[in-house]
Amino acid sequence: PSVNGWSHLGECLASLARERQQVDLEVLVADRCGPEVTDEVGRSFPWVRVLPAPGGTSIPDLRAMAIDAAVADSVAVIEDHILVPPGWARSLLHARASFPVVAGSIVNGATDGLVNWVAFLCEYGPVMPPLEPGFRESIPGNNTVYARDLLVAHREVTHSGQWENALHGALRAAGIGLRFCPSITVAHRKPLRLSGYLSERFWFSRSWAGLASDNLGILARLLHGAAALVALPPVLIIRLLPHVWRAPLPVHRRLAVVPLLVPCVLAWSLGEAAGYWAGPGNSLARVC
């Protein structure tokens, strides 16, 4: 999915271009940014297939467009601000030969500034190496490869407008293990300001909770929203601190990250409360 403009997408496609020397890749870009981006892709990377979409198209719907268009037996999903290292595609396909679903780990590709670190740790601390390989309840959705026949069989879920957790839950329910291979890494490179991240975190959390509340009654939604406001912030802090402590940072910088967790988890909890109480609104279109 292309939602952040050419500066991010261009770096991503350049990293994929190196992979084409080893693996026959079909690269699909579902773009909601418009002609400025799609024209540049055509000039700089003519081997990329662009799927234009309206400006308000959500990331889950962009992914669904590309999944429909993909023809290979293995379909990998990344994002426009992901940089893949040399050998990434070959390693992912090698692992896919043994497992129908494989996800790799994610490292921080925007290491300047504490805000970039706190944003990365909030989003990807649980999949930051070093970690042990194995089957997981939860895997990332932006360094993942699937057997195409699984995506076809679960088309109703991939086209439901929901985030990847819905697909992964459906796969687990069908008895499909989610294999995590932390040696297969990508870099998440998305420099942020604190205000930008707080906004992004709020809208993502609202979209997630709004979609999750579809099948809940009014009382359950009220209770879930109240729990998000009261109980979620301390729970998130407790969960995040171990990831902060194992981050590849000097001790003084790890300590400096901790106070920044507070506004981040507050935006997180406010977003979930809004989603449970008022639904997703247009939040999906505002996540980038």
Image (cartoon, rainbow, N blue to C red):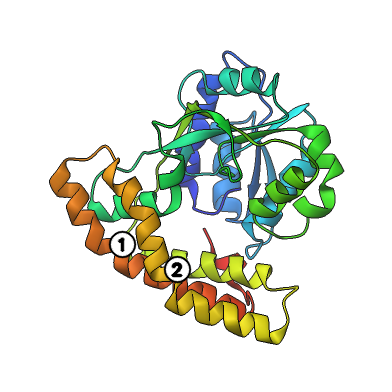
Q: Nearer the viewer, residue 74 or 273?
A: 273
257 vs 104, left or right, is left
Q: Position of residue 34 (x, y in %)?
A: 60, 55
Circle 2 residue: 268
Q: CA distance from mark 1 to mark 2?
A: 10 Å
Q: Residue at x 69, y 86 (%)?
A: 218
Q: Residue at x 46, y 40 (%)?
A: 127
Q: Residue at x 76, y 51 (%)?
A: 158
Amino acid tagged 2: Trp
Circle 1 residue: 261
Q: Nearer the viewer, residue 204 or 102?
A: 102
278 vs 232, left or right, is right
Q: Secondary structure at mark 1?
A: helix
Q: Is residue 83 visible?
A: yes
Q: Nearer the viewer, residue 79 or 41?
A: 79
Question: Vertical placement of 187 versus 184: above or below?
Answer: below
Q: Based on the displayed image, in which of its 4 quarters is residue 201 positioned?
A: bottom left
Residues tagged 1 and 2 counted as in contact (Cβ below 8 A): no
User: From this viewpoint, which residue is outermost toward the left?
Assistant: 252
Q: Position of residue 285 (x, y in %)?
A: 60, 66
Q: Secondary structure at mark 2?
A: helix
Q: Is residue 52 visible?
A: no
Amino acid tagged 1: Leu
Q: Based on the displayed image, in which of its 4 quarters is residue 106 positioned?
A: top left
